[in-house]
Image (cartoon, rainbow, N blue to C red):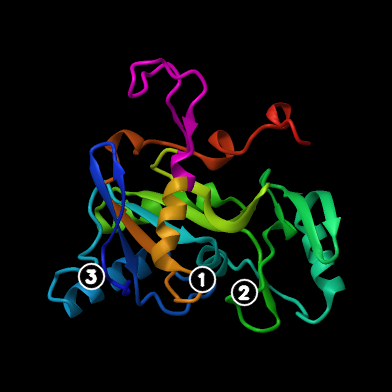
Amino acid sequence: MQPGDGVPAVAGPGGSLSIVPVVGIGSVGAGDDLADRCVAALAATARATGGTGGGGGLSDGDVLVVTQKVVSKSEGRIVAIDHDDPEAKRRLVEQESVRVIRRRGDLMITETRHGFVCANAGVDLSNVEAGTAALLPLDADRSARRIREALEHRHGVTVGVVVSDTFGRTWRRGVVDVAIGVAGVAGVADLRGTPDAMGRVLEATEVCIADELAAAAELVMGKDRGVPMAVIRGVDPRWLRTASVAAEIVRPPGEDLFR
């Protein structure tokens, strides 16, 4: 898999999906415009490849997946911290949490102000400058809306946007990328009341479309390639709508059987 290649993902309701890594974003700092960075990087790749196989710009109906790390950098959510001081990290995690649920050694499972239950309140020391840490965006749904609106108003393209981050999963090893913010693409597709392949009516099935898109995009972005964005093409148009992680995906405490 090479940067710039379109990578088939999974069969969607109307056919297949493809995932295109957005290469050449470069270093991102506070105040940088991620929409402009994306468009410029895709245009540069298209020129370098003669307009084939490397991005070719955004099209209406695409979904742009952007990692939390570059969103946090662009929004100034980078703070100083001594990486060698576990107490400094503990204090920062507690500062970013509304509740500490479990502790084990240096690991804390906490609830953030966004309602996310995750390791260390999303405080991340990877892929940032030495002596700093990245915090989650204050409102990742709003971050996604800003990127989407900039692409629409300045670049004339209507896309969905997913802000992704890496989360662990209870009872399963390994991490996956999930959506922490969305705009213009469904958080959850509610299939209750629709027939399955055998004609039986589904009674409980709700599919987290945004998380599936985030996880698929991570396959071409990775943690060590310096690729913080990917474009997903072929998304079912029925999924392209007003949406919110906070409203659709975060489970309310009253529905949570484990807290």
For badge 2, the amino acid type reads: Ser
Secondary structure, mark 1, is loop
Pick out the residue farthest to the left. 50
- Residue 22: percent from left, percent from top: 34, 68
* Residue nearer the viewer, 91 or 120: 120
Q: Which residues are magenta?
A: 187-211
* Residue nearer the viewer, 253 or 32: 253
- Residue 259: percent from left, percent from top: 78, 36
Secondary structure, mark 2, is loop
Q: Quadrant of residue 250?
A: top right
Residue bearing mark 1: 223
- Residue 88: percent from left, percent from top: 83, 73
Picture layout, residue 116 above or below residue 190: below
Pick out the residue farthest to the bottom. 130
Q: Nearer the viewer, mark 2 or mark 1?
A: 1
Who's the residue at 23% across and 38% down the image? 14
Q: Main secondary structure of the magenta part?
A: loop
Q: Is residue 143 left or right of residue 231?
A: right
Q: Is residue 117 left or right of residue 63?
A: right
**Disc 2 vs disc 1: Cβ atoms closer than 8 Å?**
yes
Label of residue 54 in the image:
3
Q: Would residue 33 be visible to someone looking at this image?
A: no
Binning the other alpha carbons within 10 Å of mark 3 as few (below 14), some (14 to 19) or many (20 upward) gives many
Of labels 2 and 1, earlier in sequence is 2
Q: Nearer the viewer, mark 1 or mark 3?
A: 1
* Residue 119 magenta-highlighted: no
Residue bearing mark 2: 126
